[in-house]
Image (tube, rainbow, N blue to C red):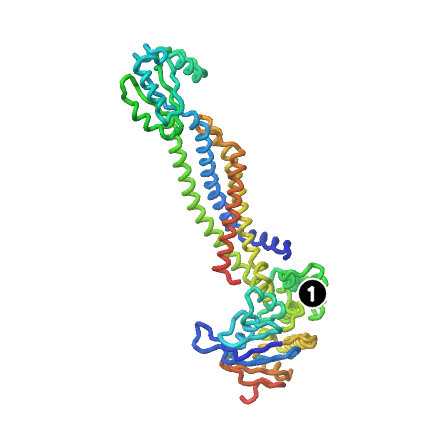
Amino acid sequence: MIRLEEVSKVYKTSTRPALERVSVEMDKGEFVFLIGPSGSGKSTFLRLLLREEVPSKGRVFVSNFDVAKMARRRVPRLRQTIGCVFQDFRLLGNKTVAENVAFALEVIGKPKQTIRKVVPEVLELVGLDGKADRLPNELSGGEQQRVAIARAFVNRPLVLLADEPTGNLDPDTSQDIMLLLERINRTGTTVVMATHDHSIVDSMRRRVVELHLGRVVRDDARGVYGVGR
Amino acid sequence: MRASFVFSEVITGLRRNITMTIAMIITTAISLAMLGGGLIIVGSIDKMQQRYMADIEVSVYFTSDISASDKDCSGPVCQQIRQELGDNPLVESVVFEDRDKAYQRFKEIFASQPELVELATPGSLPASLKVKLKDPTRSELLVKQYTGKPGVDRVDDQSEFLDRFFSVLNAGRNITFVVFVVLLLAALMLISNTIQVSAFTRRTEVGIMRLVGATRWYTQLPFLLEAVVAGLAGAVLSVGGLIGLKYVFLDGILEKIPPLPKVELIDILFPVAPVLIGASVIISAITGYLTLRLYVRN
């Protein structure tokens, strides 16, 4: 589903590469933690998958897209197969929960009747049925993140990228969010989650890819956060 | 593409930025009105040329003794000059007008001012040769050739009189075009700025749109249309302004200056209005597109 081949990324403003000769493969339906300290290259990794950045060297594949080489006008197609969740939720404050989720479908030109059908479904999946007409600032952090996940998942992406999705949440709420991500993973969606949260990584016992200074230093099939340190 | 989505984005965008929008529309409108004014003047010049140039004559007036003695251009002086003019390749026709005919014509022209007619007598008007040229713009040569000849009092060139109007009109046209260009620059910068501000205030939305895979049309068309809608509003306002100006000021002023043709409503509606609207839409669309390309990440 995701494959990086000898990928290096050097930013113009930096002397040290953000990623250096990274080769990783993630299969369909996998749940992968991407861990490492700040500046280790986690965000760059995710940005390459979304083609927010292009690699300086190497090749990136997502599904059947040759991400680094594809034409710019095809990038929207790629992004429609990838869902994204962030630490800061990135919801639109002037739109209700349902409208926030619907927005993601409207802007890719989905017909109205489809939107009317799938938005309640996905809100139920994330446990927000009944809160469809609330505004984001009327919700707790955990609920807001659920809206963001609903928005990321509503178009049934093949891949869900989560960049520190629990970074702003307390441990109990984080646990709920993880359960939700697991549920999404069980539908066959590949989930890649960048995180700092030891306890979550340790309790889930999923694949762990650790980056350090832009290199893959560990890739455990059923890993914990802090081995060997 | 969902039209309702794009349309509502455009309206919200213009409303959120209402002061900028108004500034943009007004500047565009005045700039276009200048262009329109210039075009109307060009039209007036054309009309005048069509209306008067064909009838323009060079009149060779004879001194009063010849005017008094020679009733039918049979005298040596008059006959020679008429012969010469008739042979001149520039000349189309030569007609002799004696004092009586001149007086008749004078009465016709000033029929509305009887006090003037009363003052004149046939004896006070000179006899003349009315010369029509094949190319009225080349009258200078004749004027030079016959001025000061024995028996000739003076040579009058009607086109000289018209030229004075043309030079005033041309100057007016040039001024409006210069003001148009200057204001156009201001309008372009305002359009570009408004789009940038608009894109900045909506960066979260646009960020989300890009993330979920919206095409560039979806993310950028609302901004582009904002510029075009404002441009269109400016164009409509300028056409309305020109029409208003015609009825409130121009009609009254032009009536008092007879050689200047009246500006008709149709003159504004036909060549001018579509030009202004088309120019405005094209210019604002191009400015919007370039701004998005150069300043706004997509």
The residue at the point 55 percent across, 49 percent down is B229
Q: Is residue B20 depicted above or below A224 in this figure?
A: above
Classify residue A48 by image quadrant.
bottom right
Position of A17 with respect to A60 (left or right) is left
Residue A197 image point, x, y percent: 58, 80
Residue reaching furthest bottom? A228
The number of discs equals: 1
Question: Which residue is farthest front?
Answer: B87
- Whole-percent x and y of residue A105? 65, 63
Instruction: Evaluate whether residue A96 shows in this view.
Output: no
Q: Viewed as shown, does residue A224 lie left or right of B80? A: right
Identified by mark 1, the residue type is Lys
Give x and y (percent) for residue B131. 38, 22
Does any portion of residue B130 appear in the rendered image?
yes
Secondary structure category for the residue under label 1:
loop
Tell me the subunit letter for badge 1. A
Task: Indicate the quadrant containing the N terminus of chain A: top left, top right, bottom left or bottom right.
Answer: bottom right
Taking depth in this image into account, of A127 and B26 the one nearest to the observer is B26
* Residue on which the image places disc 1: A131
Residue at 33 percent of width and 28 percent of height = B140
- Residue B110 percent across, percent down from the top left: 43, 17
Q: Residues within 10 Å of mark 1 (few under 14, many from 20)?
A: some
Relative side of A78 to A113, left or right: left
In terms of depth relative to the viewer, which is nearer, B21 or A188? A188
Nearer-the-camera pick, A181 or B96: B96
